[in-house]
Amino acid sequence: MKQQWDKRGRLSVLTGTLSVLLVGCGGAGSGGGSVADGGIRGTGSSVGPVSGFGSVFVNGVRFETDGRVSSDDGLGREDQLSEGMIVRIRGEWRSDDQGVASDVRYDDTLRGPLSAASWDDAERTGSLTVLDQSVVLDGQTVFRGADPVTLASAPADYVVRVSGWRQADGRFRASYVGARGVAGAPFDDLTEVEIEGDVANLTQETFTLGGRTVVFGDGALDDDIESLENGLSVEVEGSLQSDGAILGSEIEPDDRTRYFGSDEDFELTGPVTEAAQNGQLAVSDIPVRIDDRTELDDDLLPADLQPGLLVSVEGDLSDDIVRAEEIKRREGDAELEASVLSIDRAAGVMNVGGVSVRLSTVSIITGDDDDRLTLSSLSTGDLLEIEGIQRRDEGGFLEALTIDRDDDDDEASWELEGRVSDAEDNAITVLGVRIQSNSVPSGLSAGDQVEVSYRQNAGGSFVASEIEVEDDDGSD
């Protein structure tokens, strides 16, 4: 468990930080601020998805910038970034979650034509195929240009850029998907592609990345690559040929290898790629060392650090290893679809279907058209779909990771999914809300994962119409 002073400190700061989001500040900060007076928490690199602007929010820190972005992918300004894009920030950050960036860097993970797509709107999961690479979609993926339903209905009509993480199984997990229609797009937009992976089947002129052939010459290799060899992790930019091969114009070390080699404070958000064993795991293939001084998030145990779990790590990067001081869960373990009953904008807290929902600097809010929204965009009565982390403190609340406002739907009942904190003969408590029921499943106990359909009656009580208990594998 975290120490109480840390929780209170973060919550008091959160109110001030959220006020920046609520007034809708746009554009960049001055870039000239000093973090010396607030107590330096870190000086180095912070790598993770953008969660907000005014200036740039990454890993829960609001970084002032000068408005510039370093990128080889056509992005040069902060206002060209989007929530969900994974960036690397060099700079300083304080214990009050404010910082100053000296450099903001972005690089696509994949870019090219979409050949296949699927999406389950009920489960909020799906997949894309880009340049033969499989991309996993989930409720935290941010979409721009086209929603996942549209992409799944006509994948061949789009080219996409993906910002995400390579997983242990070789697939990519998308944090951001930007789509552009093929019709009317300039020719270069359709043929200029980017791909990353491990070199295989190397010959004098070709190799493959995830099954896709890359043709290269001596001039394509970056200075940081002495020679190509099978198993080397690289990133390739080039043009798509008529036979499907990529003519590589630039071959560089992939994003992961660029983190190595410097002694600095380091923050990273990414999926676990190697399970914790003997005091070490890997996050985005970066070795992370843990010990009894490492502070783990609420309800998070070393045994929970299994491949695929999305986490944030803060520590020191030295000798190509991160020595973790703190590890936080960034994987949603609870979901809620209900109407807003009240909003405390100053505190960044909503009552949604009886559940206390708290926003943080990593929360992302979107509308039906994937429009960028802030808390000030939401109103009482709005129907929201929320994915977040279930917290037990202060009677229980939901820490929101993603919030999607449904402008068209008017659900007859609300739904939530989470762990039971209390079970009675005629009621259960989930996500801090007590829900009455005449049919509580026999044997239900605290800690069980349930899906509940419910509604608020005229007297203000919450009443369940259905309660389903999930098995350990997530099935009903």
Image (cartoon, helix red, strand yellow):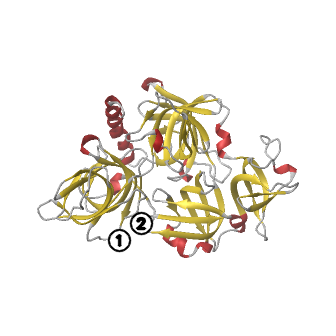
Question: At label 1, which amino acid type do we have?
Answer: Asp
Residue 323 seen in render: yes
- Above or below, 1 against 446 in this view is above
Instruction: Residue 395: give x, y in percent of width and height.
Output: 24, 44
Question: At label 2, which amino acid type do we have?
Answer: Asp
For label 1, the SS is: loop
Is 409 displayed left or right of 40 in the figure? left
Instruction: Report the residue marked by disc 1.
Output: 408
Q: Quadrant of the C terminus?
A: bottom left
User: Image quadrant of residue 282?
Assistant: top right
Instruction: Report the residue marked by disc 2.
Output: 368
Instruction: Residue 127: give x, y in percent of width and height.
Output: 55, 65
> Closer to the camera, 184 or 85?
85
Give the mark nearest the N terminus, 2 or 1.
2
Do labels 2 and 1 touch, CB within 8 Å? yes
Residue 57 seen in render: no
- Above or below, 263 against 250 in this view is above
User: Image quadrant of residue 352?
Assistant: bottom left
Is 116 displayed left or right of 50 in the figure? right
CA–CA distance between discs 2 and 1?
8 Å
- Residue drawn at the location 31% of the way across and 46% of the way down: 348
